[in-house]
Image: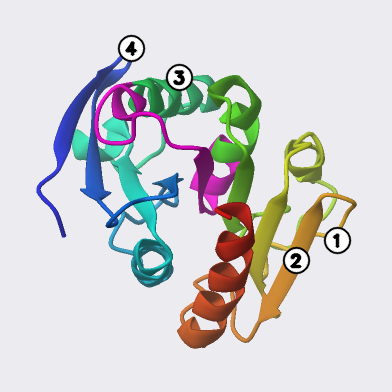
């Protein structure tokens, strides 16, 4: 993994691990899940695929994680820190590139909430947590439905956090496994590769 870039945000320093593609056609900025970092296997797999598709990638670590805290910050702080990281990256390594935002689980929710303000062209969600396990009445689907950009959701078929439906601008790629998306990483790679190739064209 690349040496992280320190980024000051309104809620403490974040970090970004930047993987530059040769002659990049677009940029992909990804956030991590609530309990895991940017080393999650699906994030690593997607980074490899994106760079191979001439898309530069930045994996953003939220300030709470950089500070060594386990519990995520409140949504407004997560969103502000992610937005600040994007602004910093677009002024540097990712300058001038069409922007795709995304993340896994919690990071996917942050990306959905901030995509429009960031000027993104598309959104990539890995294991979007539709509702807490066993609590379908606590739906977060409105965050996903609010996104009007082309969106890909890669979801494990047995994810206890639920399965989002496809929509006019939203593809849902179902793969074997649960919320961790570890069971069939090749299927995750294939789904993201095909979609990214279209978005970066």
Q: Answer with mark 1 or mark 4, whichever residue precedes in sequence.
A: 4
Other-residue count near label 1 (Cα within 10 Å), few / some / many at <14 / 14–19 / ≥20: few
C-beta proximity under 8 Å, tags 3 and 4: yes
Q: Badges 1 and 2: C-beta atoms under 8 Å apart?
A: yes
Pointer 3 local density, CA inside 10 Å: few below 14, some 14–19, many at least 20: some
- Residue 66 visible to an observer of this rendering: yes
CA gap between label 1 and label 3 equals 28 Å
Between marks 3 and 2, how big is the CA–CA gap?
Answer: 27 Å
Disc 2 designates what residue? Answer: 172
Q: Position of residue 107 (x, y in %)?
A: 49, 45
Mark 3 vs 2: CB contact within 8 A: no
The front one of 149 and 9 is 149
Q: Is residue 130 above or below residue 99?
A: below
Q: Nearer the viewer, mark 3 or mark 2?
A: 2
Q: CA distance from mark 2 to mark 4?
A: 34 Å
Q: Position of residue 53 (x, y in %)?
A: 43, 65
**Residue 188 or 120: which is nearer the viewer?**
120
For label 2, the SS is strand
Q: Name the N-terminal-most of marks 3 and 4.
A: 4
Residue that carries the numbered disc 1 in the rendered image: 165
In the image, taking residue 81 as reference, residue 76 lies left or right, namely right
Find residue 7 and report its image quarter.
Answer: top left
* Mark identifier at residue 10: 4
Q: Which residue is rendered at x = 60% and y = 20% of the image?
A: 117
The residue closer to the viewer here, 66 or 169, is: 169
């Amino acid at each position: 993994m690349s040496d992280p870039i320190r980024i000051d945000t309104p809620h403490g320093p974040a970090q970004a691990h930047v993987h530059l593609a040769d002659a990049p056609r677009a940029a992909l900025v990804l956030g991590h899940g609530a309990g895991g970092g940017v080393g999650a296997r699906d994030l690593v797999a997607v980074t490899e695929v994106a760079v191979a598709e001439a898309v530069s990638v930045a994996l953003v670590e939220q300030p709470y994680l950089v500070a060594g805290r386990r519990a995520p910050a409140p949504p407004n702080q997560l969103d502000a820190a992610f937005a600040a990281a994007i602004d910093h990256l677009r002024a540097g390594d990712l300058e001038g590139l069409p922007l795709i935002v995304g993340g896994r689980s919690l990071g996917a929710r942050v990306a959905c909430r901030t995509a429009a303000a960031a000027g993104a062209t598309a959104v990539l969600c890995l294991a979007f947590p539709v509702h807490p396990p066993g609590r379908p009445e606590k739906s977060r689907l409105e965050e996903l439905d609010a996104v009007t950009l082309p969106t890909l959701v890669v979801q494990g078929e047995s994810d206890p956090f639920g399965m989002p439906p496809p929509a006019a601008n939203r593809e849902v790629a179902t793969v074997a496994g649960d919320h961790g998306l570890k069971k069939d990483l090749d299927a995750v790679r294939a789904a993201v590769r095909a979609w990214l190739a279209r978005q970066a064209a």
